[in-house]
Amino acid sequence: MSDPLLKIENLHVAVEGKQILRGLNLVVRPGEIHAIMGPNGSGKSTLSNALMGHPNYQVTDGAVTYKGQEIQEWPADERARQGIFLAFQYPTAIPGVSLGNFLLAAVRNVRGAANVKPLEFRKELMACMKDLGIRQDFAGRYVNEGFSGGEKKRVEILQMAMLKPSLAILDETDSGLDIDALRIVAEGVNRQVTPEMGVLVITHYQRLLDYIKPHFVHVLVAGRIVQSGGPELALELEARGYDELLRTHGADAAPVVAGA
Amino acid sequence: MADASTEAAIVQQIRSDYQYGFSDAEDYVFKSGKGLTRELIMEISRIKQEPEWMLEIRLKAFEVFKSKPMPTWGADLSGIDFDDIHYYVRPSEKAETDWDDVPEYIKNTFDRLGIPEAERKFLAGVSAQYESEVVYHSIREDLEKLGVIFLDMDGALRQFPEIVRQYFGTVIPMADNKFAALNTAVWSGGSFIYVPEGVKVDIPLQAYFRINAQSMGQFERTLIITAPGSFVHYIEGCTAPVYSKDSLHAAVVELIALEGSKIRYTTIQNWSNNVYNLVTKRAKAFRNAAVEWIDGNLGSKITMKYPAIFLMEEGARGEVLSIAFAGKGQHQDAGAKMVHLAPHTSSTVLSKSISKDGGRASYRGLVKVLPKAEKIRSNVRCDALILDPESRSDTYPTMDIGNQDVHIGHEATVSKVGDEQVFYLMSRGLSEDDAITMIVNGFFEPFTKELPLEYAVELNRLIKLEMEGSVG
């Protein structure tokens, strides 16, 4: 087995003093696609924000190792430069900054300015936009300003295509997408997946996993992974729902005895 | 009080942050002592060999200046000591039209500021003012042949005294405010532009203002007249050395846009942080004429400036697009005045300000509609971005609407740089500094996109410099 790309051990994360993740363990190796499923409030977005290094998400215990290095002290920009990418659930608008200029700055920072030639960059950008069905004039539009939900998600995947991460975290990329947009976005992701890359697909619903086929599925409830399995687990969950798992593992369930 | 050595160290520190903060040794033809007297005004007029009527205007304005109290509204002007200012400094004998004839040390300064290079690349004419006098001006030959006049104000008074006499002080009377009176008394330099009927000056004319001496007062006077159907874009830039003592810049700018003509007036003010910048700018726009003030305020200690447009006749349009950047120790009190005197006139104000490191940015604006001015449209929007809790932003809009059949909009927003925006950009590999700079540049984008490319690039660079080290 190859060395883990990402290793999460006993991760505890608090947001504004509230403990959200409470001992999460996960190993992602190169070439693997993992799906993390869970009900609302189980800590899915907390996990993605914490992995990207959002300053409001405090790691209170545990460790995250990426390519063999502890990354707890790395700010978000360092993580990005080292190949971690987060496709946001709710991408933020940056008024007055064109998507093209933003991406050029991003690509220069991640690949190194000397490795980015403006003309080649432009060609690459146009090709990627075409693949994702994004009109060329979007390069001149302000980042996420006035974009529809589907356009925002496509543009997230466009950024992923340009930044070529080693570890991609897709946070609820399917939310707000109709079935056609979902297919385009998923195909975009699939085209980018390489044998060296790890992907973490975070989702509430199973339907995205019809398009992006995970090797492993994990169920997140109340800040912990309570069940892991193959792709069939996603289908099971879709059939049964989260209710039973919430009753056994939810925050309202009887406290788990330490070490149990 | 800081002793001399720490003061020097502080000045040195500021100089290293502000790239235009260098100064030249003084080698002047004439430098007045400190303070302003009737005799000095007569001396200035004599040196300039002015007609008698101009001297009379100056002396009258001097009395008005003395009689008017300091403004007590707006920014704090109590630090100005009128007796501690050099009112007239003449660096050379005349305004040269050949760059080679400009005194060497002045040439070097403007070289460092990139002026001759800019002229070669993308300007139709250039004027360079150093202290009180324009030392160099030029205009593209083809424009001169079309009858476009682009001179320093003193040269215009000598060559076209009748035109100057006809328009001088007709837009901004000497008694308008204390600093307009002061300017009228001691004015020197500035630009005079006349564009004949139907002539469209396709690329910008530029003036550059440089203060060099310590405790200097610069009082340029600019007058632009566009004849019917003509167009001109005028750009001015300004810088000064960093000193521990303050300088005063009190310009008066009058624009007259005759029927169907258009004036665009762009300012990139980047004075060092020891300059009081108290400027009166006003335009009259006649039938179907348009005036645009594109006003960028980055530098200075205190700026009080409210570019105004009087919409005199039907169909006149006015636009003010301004940005202000108030950093440490700075107060940018800027805004706009729109006065609708005629029906079917329209005005737009977009003001964007940023305050950081304890800086203070204020928007002060007036929209006035006279009773007979029906069916006018006016839209005012002010956006403020505050970068840290120490900084401050205020909005003081005044509406004086004398007619009910009008369409008026006003909108003001105050925001902070959002954590989510910074995180989003950082998650794409930008450092925190770069992320905030990008957000700030985006905030100013509606202004920047109106500038010629070279200026837009320069402005973004200046903002980047201002933003450096803004994150602790």
Image (tube, rainbow, N blue to C red):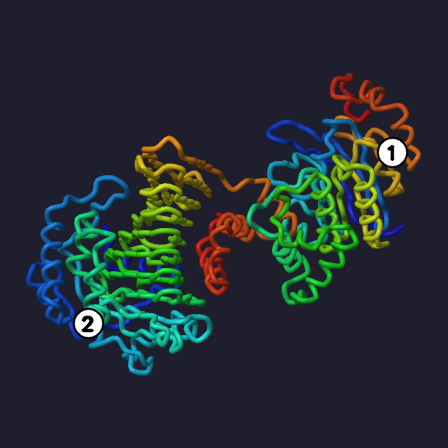
Give the side of residue B121 with respect to residue A120, left or right: left
The answer, for residue A75, to whether it is visible in the render is no
Quadrant in which residue A110 is drawn: bottom right
Mark closer to the observer (2, 1): 2
Q: Nearer the viewer, residue B345 or B354?
A: B345
Query: Judging from the image, what secondary structure is the residue with disc 1 in?
Result: strand
Give the side of residue B268 with respect to residue B249, left or right: right
Write the residue at 21% across / 48% down: B79
- CA distance for labels 2 and 1: 90 Å
Give the side of residue B87 with respect to residue A237, left or right: left
In the displayed structure, B331 sits above or below A237; it is below
Write the residue at 63% across / 27% down: A18
- Residue on which the image places disc 1: A228
Write the residue at 39% across / 51% down: B288
- Residue A49 percent coordinates (x, y): 68, 39
- Identify the chain of the residue marked 2, using the numbered disc in the image: B
Residue extending furthest toward the bottom: B100
The answer, for residue B216, to whether it is visible in the render is yes
Tell me the amino acid under the disc marked 1.
Answer: Ser
Give the number of the disc on residue B158: 2
Query: Judging from the image, what secondary structure is the residue with disc 2 in?
Result: helix
Q: Residues within 10 Å of mark 2 (few under 14, many from 20)?
A: some
- Residue A194 percent coordinates (x, y): 84, 54
Write the residue at 81% across / 36% down: A36
In the displayed structure, B394 sits above or below B286; it is above
Q: Nearer the viewer, residue A201 or B438?
A: B438
- Identify the chain of the residue marked 1, using the numbered disc in the image: A
- Residue B55 percent coordinates (x, y): 11, 63
Tell me the amino acid under the disc marked 2.
Answer: Arg
- Residue B213 percent coordinates (x, y): 24, 66
Give the side of residue B186 with respect to residue B300, left or right: left
